[in-house]
Image: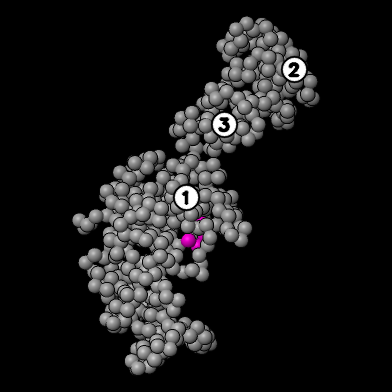
């Protein structure tokens, strides 16, 4: 790695919700920058106005914020290298497109969409693929074929044109990728990409190179779908005379479907019931997509699971804080091959974070759920309940299922448990236990347990059978933490009422 200051950028297009693969790209850029004391920039690449989606830019920024990926320079943060929205930089790019024409590395192409369409169709009829490249360009409607006077006349007349890169003939482009090693491509396999469009805006290829150069980007860390563009980008750095400051490249592996067969998509999530976006998204046309935040995932659990998709620390450690990730992260431990996403592993991460968070943190979140149900109780009681059941929960919303009986008298009784635990003599036994509990002085878990145990022993009843039936009366099911802890928390009066209700309601 060179001695220049590390400056990286995450440069999404505002074309819709940010895929979790995009969040991972941002995360790896952020971890790399912070590991090396560098800067993390957010640049919005909105030069393709036809694909711009209202609200997408804000969604991108909110997603990074939720994940704790702090932007050093960007639209909101400002910075010395702005503007950070490409559409606000449009005056910058034409100068470099003109420079490439003057140096002979690019040319004007006046071919209409109809003319190019006809060439493609003709190619299909001959079972060939038409490509605008160093073999075909000499016969087409461009400044390589036309005289200077003809070109000037077309430009002065305001004819529509694009500026294309003039790909060298039979030239070996030798490149290095931090993750993939040496990559060599012959230019005869590449087409003459459009760099500048007739609408006065650059394409991704030119804008990307110019912005990375002007923003002094040291490392370009992006998804492997951009690997085919790398030869053109390297050639552009050479053509513009910027080889000495060209960034190093690293192309990250794809996130794959749970089957491992192909790139992870929204369709996979819809089919298998998991989100592929960080936050809930509602498109301008009304289409919606679920988000990790709204599904109940903790931001730090989401970041942790993303970090280990395509990177491993070389140890057995799986749970990392952001600080630990920054300390451990390196691009040489990023894999070349795609990484399979496992929704069950995502839930496992959330469960681990549920256990790691303090009871007070979870209580603050769970109280919101209780209020939505119209339940107002003391914070101390909720915190005690959370401490008893959070180990069984994956999400905060699961805590209600594990603890509703602390806050509400059961109205239904689990049929399977009734069938198994409620015998002919159970109502009489429960009524007797109710009287015992009603008479316990200094009512608490220990005293209630002692009184009930003594009574069971005296009557020579089976302790397990009585406890299972009593749990059914108190909880409405065969679940929950220690039964006498529950009894202490709901209180003597409520305990007696629940047994009475169960005896009157449950019919074998």
Residue at the limit of the structure toward the left, as seen here: 3
The quarter of the rendered structure image containing the C terminus is: top right
* Disc 1 target residue: 62
Q: CA distance from mark 2 to mark 1?
A: 52 Å
| Position of 362 relative to 134 (above/below) | above
Label whose residue precedes the other's in the sequence (3 or 1): 1
Tell me if residue 205 can be seen.
no
Name the dominant secondary structure of the magenta segment.
loop
**Cβ atoms at labels 2 and 3 below 8 Å apart:** no
Whether residue 394 is in magenta: the answer is no
In-image side of 392 versus 199 (left or right): right
Using a 10 Å C-alpha cutoff, classify the residue at mark 2 as few (fewer than 14 neighbours), some (14 to 19) or many (20 or more).
Answer: some
Instruction: Name the residue: 38% across, 60% down.
Output: 84
Instruction: Name the residue: 77% across, 24% down.
Output: 506
The range drawn in magenta is 14-18
Whether residue 17 is in magenta: the answer is yes
165 and 411: which is toward the camera: 165
Q: CA distance from mark 2 to mark 3?
A: 30 Å
Instruction: Name the residue: 48% across, 32% down.
Output: 361
Using a 10 Å C-alpha cutoff, classify the residue at mark 3 as few (fewer than 14 neighbours), some (14 to 19) or many (20 or more).
Answer: some
* Disc 3 target residue: 367
The picture places residue 179, in percent across and down from the top left corner, at: 32, 59
Instruction: Name the residue: 56% across, 44% down.
Output: 295
Tally of marks: 3
* Disc 2 target residue: 500
Please tell me whether mark 2 or mark 3 is closer to you in this view: 3
């Amino acid at each position: 790695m060179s001695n220049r200051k590390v400056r990286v950028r995450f440069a999404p297009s505002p074309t819709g919700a940010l895929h979790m693969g995009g969040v991972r790209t941002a995360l790896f850029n952020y971890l790399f920058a912070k590991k090396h004391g560098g800067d993390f920039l957010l640049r919005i690449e909105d030069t393709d106005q036809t694909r711009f989606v209202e609200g997408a830019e804000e969604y991108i920024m909110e997603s990074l914020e939720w994940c704790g990926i702090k932007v050093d320079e960007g639209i909101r943060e400002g910075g010395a290298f702005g503007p950070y929205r490409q559409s606000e930089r449009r005056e910058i790019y034409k100068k470099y497109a003109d420079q490439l024409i003057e140096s002979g590395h690019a040319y004007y192409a006046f071919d209409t969409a109809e003319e190019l369409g006809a060439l493609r169709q003709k190619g299909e009829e001959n079972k060939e693929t038409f490509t605008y490249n160093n073999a075909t360009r000499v016969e087409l409607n461009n400044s390589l074929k036309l005289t200077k006077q003809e070109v000037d006349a077309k430009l002065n007349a305001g004819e529509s044109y694009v500026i294309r890169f003039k790909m060298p003939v039979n030239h070996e482009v030798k490149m290095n990728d931090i993750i993939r090693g040496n990559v060599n491509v012959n230019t005869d396999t590449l087409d003459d990409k459009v760099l500048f469009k007739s609408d006065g805006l650059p394409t991704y290829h030119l804008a990307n190179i110019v912005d990375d150069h002007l923003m002094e980007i040291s490392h370009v860390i992006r998804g492997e779908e951009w690997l085919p563009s790398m030869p053109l980008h390297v050639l552009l750095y050479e053509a513009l005379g910027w080889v000495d400051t060209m960034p190093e490249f690293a192309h990250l592996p794809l996130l794959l479907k749970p089957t491992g067969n192909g790139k992870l998509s929204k369709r996979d999530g819809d089919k298998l019931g998991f989100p592929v976006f960080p936050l809930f998204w509602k498109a301008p046309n009304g289409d919606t997509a679920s988000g990790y935040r709204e599904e109940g995932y903790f931001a730090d659990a989401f970041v942790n699971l993303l970090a280990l998709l395509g990177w491993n620390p070389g140890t057995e450690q799986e749970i990392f804080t952001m600080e630990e990730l920054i300390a451990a992260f390196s691009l040489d431990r990023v894999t070349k091959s795609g990484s399979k996403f496992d929704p069950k592993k995502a839930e496992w991460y959330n469960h681990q974070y549920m256990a790691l968070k303090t009871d007070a943190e979870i209580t603050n979140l769970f109280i919101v759920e209780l209020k939505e149900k119209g339940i107002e109780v003391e914070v101390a009681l909720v915190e005690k309940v959370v401490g008893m059941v959070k180990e069984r929960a994956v999400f905060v919303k699961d805590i209600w299922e594990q603890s509703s009986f602390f806050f509400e008298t059961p109205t239904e009784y689990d049929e399977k448990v009734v069938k198994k635990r409620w015998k002919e003599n159970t109502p009489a036994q429960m009524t007797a236990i109710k009287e015992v509990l009603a008479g316990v002085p200094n009512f608490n878990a220990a005293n209630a347990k002692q009184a009930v145990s003594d009574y069971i022993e005296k009557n020579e009843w089976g302790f397990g059978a009585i406890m299972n039936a009593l749990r059914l009366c108190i909880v409405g099911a065969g679940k929950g933490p220690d039964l006498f802890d529950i009894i202490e928390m709901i209180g003597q009066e409520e305990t007696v009422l629940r047994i009475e209700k169960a005896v009157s309601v449950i019919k074998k």
